Image (cartoon, helix red, strand yellow):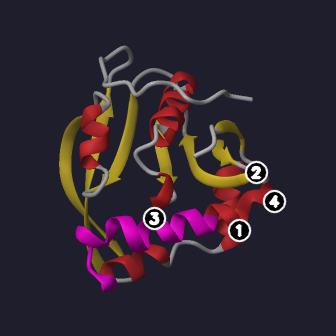
Amino acid sequence: MSLFHLRSYRSEDIQEVLSVFRESITVTCAKDYSMQQRTAWLSGGEPERFDARLQESFSLVAIVDGKVVGFGNLAEGNRIDLLYVRPSFQRKGIASALLEALEEKAAGATEVETSMTALPFFLSHGYRLVVEQTVYRMGVALKNNRMRKERGAPSYRFPSFSSFR
């Protein structure tokens, strides 16, 4: 794999971002969520709404060979809203680099509502479970976790392979 770098999200990234979002949910989350649950989850991926959501927050993309392979955003000053990496690029430090950059921008402690699939990742980065909860998309129940990390809490760090531009 080529080295990756992070940069700010731009509207022209939306189709690649949505591709990462869909592939991550469809493939990576298959072990924890049924097809019905993943289909309901994906219902929130309309390009105009998704682009607006990313434009209205601090949003980054991870780039490898000119292609978006991951993205994340920080909303409301301290809430990790989205954090997804294309399955073929997972476990290469990309999500960790995105998370670290978002945390650095955060105003104080960070919070996230994370899937069951992402729970171990966030635990390994110093987040603590606040509550397991059920959310509904299109009338379909999905379990997730509300988590929090105090500023300065220790976390497992992957080697840094990125540069932020």
- Mark 4: which amino acid? Glu
Local SS, label 1: helix
Q: Which callout, 2 or 1, points at the residue further toward the start of the chain?
A: 1
Q: Earlier in the sequence, mark 3 or mark 1?
A: 1
Q: Quadrant of the C terminus?
A: top right
Please name which of the two marks, 2 or 4, marks the residue nearer to the observer.
2
Residue 58, horizontal then vertical, whole percent: 64, 39
Q: CA distance from mark 2 to mark 4?
A: 13 Å
Disc 2 marks which amino acid? Gly
Q: Which mark is residue 121?
A: none
User: Circle 1: is it few (<14), some (14-19), or many (20+) Cα within 10 Å?
Assistant: few
Q: Which residues are magenta?
A: 18-36
Q: Is residue 98 something that shows in the picture?
A: yes
Which of 18 and 107 lies nearest the eye of the viewer?
18
Q: Which residue is mark 2?
A: 66
Question: What's the CA distance linking mark 3 and mark 2?
Answer: 19 Å
Q: CA distance from mark 2 to mark 1?
A: 14 Å
Nearer to us of marks 2 and 1 is 2
Where disc 3 sits, the SS reads helix
Q: CA distance from mark 1 to mark 4?
A: 7 Å
Q: Residue beneath label 1, please?
A: 15
Q: Nearer the viewer, residue 164 or 75?
A: 164
